[in-house]
C-alpha cells in the first residue's frame, strides 16, 4: 500500500506529475495531477518548480492519508462531523462508563 509521486517527460521538454496509487496487490492505478514542471533556466523557473512539487507532495499525502484511514477503518481527522461537542463528549462519557476507565473523572467534567 502506498502512493508514489512520479514524473513523465513530455514532448515539449516539460515533466507531467502523476500519482502511482497502490492500494493492494491487485488494485493499482494512476492519477494525473495536471501539474507540470518546466525546464529550469532561471531562478524563477526553479522556484516555480519547487512550489509545484510542494503542491504535488501535499496532494500525495492527502491520498495516502485517505487510503490509510479507509484501510484501517479509522475516521479521517479532517472529516466534518454532524454533531456538537456536547454530543461528542457525552459519547466519550458513555464509552468510559462501559469500560470503567476514569468514568468518575469524565462524569464530573
Image (spheres, grey):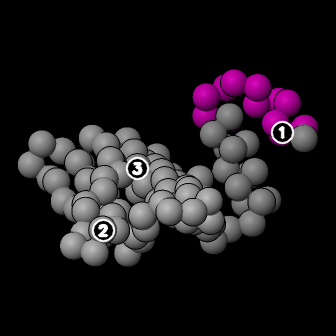
Residues in magenta?
97-108
User: What residue sits right under mark 3 in the picture?
Assistant: 64
Q: Does any portion of residue 84 appear in the rendered image?
A: yes
> Most prominent secondary structure in the magenta stretch?
helix
Question: What is the secondary structure assignment of the residue under circle 2?
Answer: loop
Q: Which residue is drawn at 75% across and 66% down?
A: 84
Sequence-wise, the earlier of marks 2 and 1 is 2
Q: Does any portion of residue 16 appear in the rendered image?
A: no
Whether residues under marks 2 and 1 lie with C-beta atoms below 8 angstroms apart, the answer is no
Q: Residues within 10 Å of mark 2 (few under 14, many from 20)?
A: few
Question: What is the secondary structure assignment of the residue under circle 3?
Answer: helix
Q: How many marks?
A: 3
Q: Is residue 59 left or right of residue 18?
A: right
User: What residue sits right under mark 2 in the picture?
Assistant: 13
45 or 3: nearer the viewer: 45
Q: Which residue is drawn at 62% across and 65% down?
A: 44
Measured as percent of width and height from the top left, residue 85 is found at 77, 60
- Mark 1 vs mark 3, CA separation in Å: 37 Å
Q: Which residue is drawn at 27% across and 41% down?
A: 1
Observer-side mark, 3 or 2, equals 2
Q: Residues within 10 Å of mark 3 (few under 14, many from 20)?
A: some
Sequence-wise, the earlier of marks 3 and 2 is 2
User: What residue sits right under mark 1 in the picture?
Assistant: 107
Amino acid at each position: 500500500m502506498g502512493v508514489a509521486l512520479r514524473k513523465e517527460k513530455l514532448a515539449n521538454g516539460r515533466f507531467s506529475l502523476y500519482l502511482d496509487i497502490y492500494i493492494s496487490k491487485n488494485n493499482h492505478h494512476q492519477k494525473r495531477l495536471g501539474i507540470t514542471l518546466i525546464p529550469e533556466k532561471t531562478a524563477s523557473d526553479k522556484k516555480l518548480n519547487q512550489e509545484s512539487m510542494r503542491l504535488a507532495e501535499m496532494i500525495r499525502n492527502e491520498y495516502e492519508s485517505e487510503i490509510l484511514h479507509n484501510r484501517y477503518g479509522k475516521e479521517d481527522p479532517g472529516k466534518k462531523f454532524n454533531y456538537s461537542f456536547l454530543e461528542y463528549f457525552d459519547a466519550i462519557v458513555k464509552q468510559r462508563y462501559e469500560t470503567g476507565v476514569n468514568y468518575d473523572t469524565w462524569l464530573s467534567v
